[in-house]
Image (tube, grey):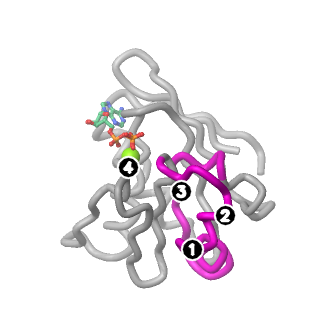
């Protein structure tokens, strides 16, 4: 995919972007959300899930549970994964083969990500965020 860059001035713009992006996703597809603590990986995942599964969907951060499932959408946070061997136990392979799979802290899983994974790199840009999609 050709690289795309978006400058999002505030949280609302980030949410609006995530809502439009969500509509382009069809399973199976993997979205790798790269970025430091607090960059907005969970905010983007939450908007995608609410757009596709309903506004009332409760989307807790999977920091402790490692994965949350929403009927064909799997939301992972791999921050606490110590070793790649743990990824099979939490169902990552099944998810990437079948689901809309959203992954925060995806580096530990890089060898399991499909070639057509959409990588989103989030950095600070003033008070907002810069998204590089590739
Ligand atoms: N333009 C913006 N886009 C996204 N989030 C923003 C923006 N500006 C400020 N924020 C704030 O940044 C925080 C992002 O938190 P979030 O939990 O989504 O980060 P995260 O990348 O998932 O962090 P972690 O690595 O801890 O999981 C929120 O508190 C949000 O209000
Ligand atoms: Mg998060």
User: Do labels 2 and 1 touch, CB within 8 Å?
Assistant: yes
From mark 2 to mark 4, how far is it between C-alphas? 24 Å
Image point (61%, 65%), residue name: 87
Tell whether circle 4 marks a residue whose Cβ is less than 8 angstroms from ligand 2.
yes
Residue, disc 4: 42
Image point (34%, 19%), residue name: 127
Disc 3 crowd rating (10 Å Cα; few below 14, some 14-19, many 20+) is many
Task: Give the answer, above or below, for where 35 lies relative to 110.
Answer: above
Q: Residue 86: image x %, image y %?
A: 59, 64
Q: Which mark is residue 129?
A: none
Disc 1 crowd rating (10 Å Cα; few below 14, some 14-19, many 20+) is few
Residue, disc 2: 85
Q: Earlier in the sequence, mark 4 or mark 1?
A: 4
From mark 1 to mark 3, how far is it between C-alphas? 16 Å
Based on the displayed image, in which of its 4 quarters is residue 68 positioned?
bottom left
Residue, disc 3: 103
Residue, disc 1: 89
Q: Left or right of 27: which side holds 47? A: left
Disc 4 crowd rating (10 Å Cα; few below 14, some 14-19, many 20+) is many
Front position in the image: 117 or 24: 117
The residue most toward the left is 56
Q: Which residues are magenta?
A: 80-108
Q: Earlier in the sequence, mark 1 or mark 3?
A: 1
**Which structural element holds mark 4?**
helix
From mark 4 to mark 1, how far is it between C-alphas? 22 Å
């Amino acid at each position: 995919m050709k690289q795309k860059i978006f400058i999002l001035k505030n949280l609302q713009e980030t949410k609006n972007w995530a809502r439009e992006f969500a509509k382009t996703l069809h399973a199976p597809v993997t979205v790798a959300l790269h970025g430091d603590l607090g960059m907005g990986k969970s905010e983007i995942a939450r908007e995608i899930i609410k757009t596709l599964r309903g506004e009332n969907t409760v989307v807790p951060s999977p920091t402790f549970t490692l994965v949350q499932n929403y009927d064909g959408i799997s939301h992972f946070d791999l921050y606490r994964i110590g070793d790649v061997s743990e990824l099979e136990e939490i169902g990552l392979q099944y998810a990437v083969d079948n689901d809309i799979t959203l992954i925060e802290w995806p580096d530990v899983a890089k060898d399991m990500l499909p070639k057509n994974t959409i990588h989103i790199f989030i950095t600070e840009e003033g008070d907002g965020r810069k998204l590089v999609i590739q």
